[in-house]
Amino acid sequence: MADKATQSQSGARLTRRALIAGAGGAALAAPVLAQELGRMIDLGLPGGPSLRPLEPAFPGKRDMIVQRIRPPLLEAPMGVFREGVITPNDRMFVRWNWDMPTAITAAEHRVALGGAVKAPVSLTLDDIASAGEHVEVVAINQCAGNGRGLSEPRVTGTQWGNGAMGCAKWTGVRLKDVLAKAGVKEGATRVRFAGLDVPLTDGAPQFIKSIPLDIAMRDDVLVAWAMNGEALPLLHGYPLRIVVPGWFSTYWVKMLSTIEVLTGEDDSYYVAKSYRMPARPITPEEKDFDTVSITTMPPRAFITSHADGEGVALGKPLTLEGIAMGGDAALARVDLVGEGWEVPCELGPDEGPYAFRRWRVTIPAVTQDLAKIGVRAANATGAVQPDALNWNPSGYARNVIERITLVAQ
Amino acid sequence: MRAAATILAPVIALALAGCESQPQVTFTDVSVTLPDDPIDLPEGPGRQAVLENCTACHSPSTLLQQPRVSREKWESIAAKMIEVYKAPVDEAAIPAIAGYMVAVQAAGADAD
């Protein structure tokens, strides 16, 4: 919605903005970002810095917002979501916590399956592919911090706009069929995953994540090798990644190399200390509160047909379109909401409870500016997007109604 | 992706569940070349401390894209890197690191 500037102008203002930190003090260096990275995009982050480069190019990716180069953090411009519900592989967001290998030798890759199992095994890729029925799931993969950069007050961390999400068709085998290769023992509580990405510094916590056993045994939780009918791109976790429909992508561990069945709580850093949010709503001033792990996704909706500030024809009908998601349950409805009014939207084809679904609504005639309009999704469990941001210090699970203003002219 | 990592007919529709033969999945070797950061840190007091202590893990473009926060916040972030991520950051360099970040962010805000 907010990707206004796609091409850097030579104009002084954009160049100056693009410097971010480069201008100012007399000793500071020449224009860095703007000169060396031609194309920029404005994410509309309150207070800035808001411009991000669409370069350098990454293998298998096209026109992605480069949030970080190493390890890569790539965001999809909102224009990616203007059509359809499937996000092409070359436009899917990329997020790595630590550096990953840049080469995979398929015959050498193993998945170690151990912990509270009857017989630990080391599985080849062929072992995994033959572990059970091949299953397809269309599911949204969304970073827990998607939209963090829009938090007010701002919080540190990756300054995502709303493009750290995408919807793909994932193909693989059920995790439970893979677990059956070793046999889960009585008393198992959780299943933990590790990939080939490892910390840059000795002693830093490895990026490992676990899910409760009942979630691991779901029919739609996969060890996946394909994304939209193609092999997982390396940047998306080749050769294998976990898919947990309805849950934030932090659990969708990439380059899967270890599966560990646990018998107690998971006290590892990225479960016990990180990826957590306040257990109750807090104010930015509060420092003392209990936290819970972020797990399932709440409903969200976006206007994709129009950007904030765009002009619309006075006196003419106006059709708005976009995408919505139910999160961890099917989407139930989408309403276009303004200040003191709301209109139900028509929903497009249903690709399954964990997929994007398109919505559309026509206003018979534009009579004035459409100020602070947004779309509000509700899911089958009754969860509804809130009017106010559920602010939290790490900017997780944003699902406030995203509002724009359209100018009648 | 440079190497063509193609999977031949990897899919069986759910409607065909129970079908005895699974389609063949082929895993090929894959390698990619990732780009380097083309950005250099602007000159300024404390730049050397940032280069010596931060840029091994944080590329300059990432540093320059962070929202403007206080000197205390930068100091606590640097301390977290030592405590949580075991980063080999020289504690004595933290004031210089924080000073550099505050200065470049202030310069960036002025430029806005």
Image (cartoon, helix red, strand yellow):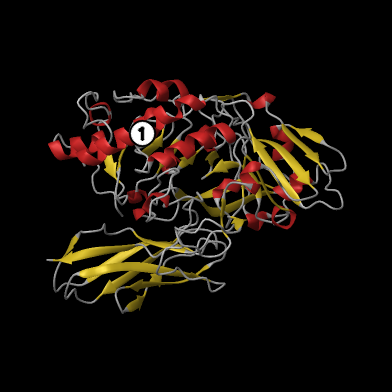
Using a 10 Å C-alpha cutoff, classify the residue at mark 1 as few (fewer than 14 neighbours), some (14 to 19) or many (20 or more).
many
User: In this image, A387 relative to A119: left or right?
Assistant: left
Figure quadrant of the N terminus of chain A: bottom left
Q: Is residue A8 visible?
A: no
For numbered disc 1, what is the local secondary structure? helix
Q: In the rendered structure, which amino acid carries the disc numbered 1?
A: Met
Residues A276 and A244: in front is A276
The residue at the point 68 percent across, 28 percent down is A109
The residue at the point 58 percent across, 26 percent down is A201
Residue B82 in the image, given as x and y percentages of width and height: 55, 31
Front one among A158 and B27: A158
Residue sitting at x 78%, y 50%: A264
The residue beneath circle 1 is: B101
Residue A297 placed where, x, y %? 54, 59
Judge left or right: residue A319 versus residue A159. left
**Picture quarter with the C terminus of chain A:** bottom left
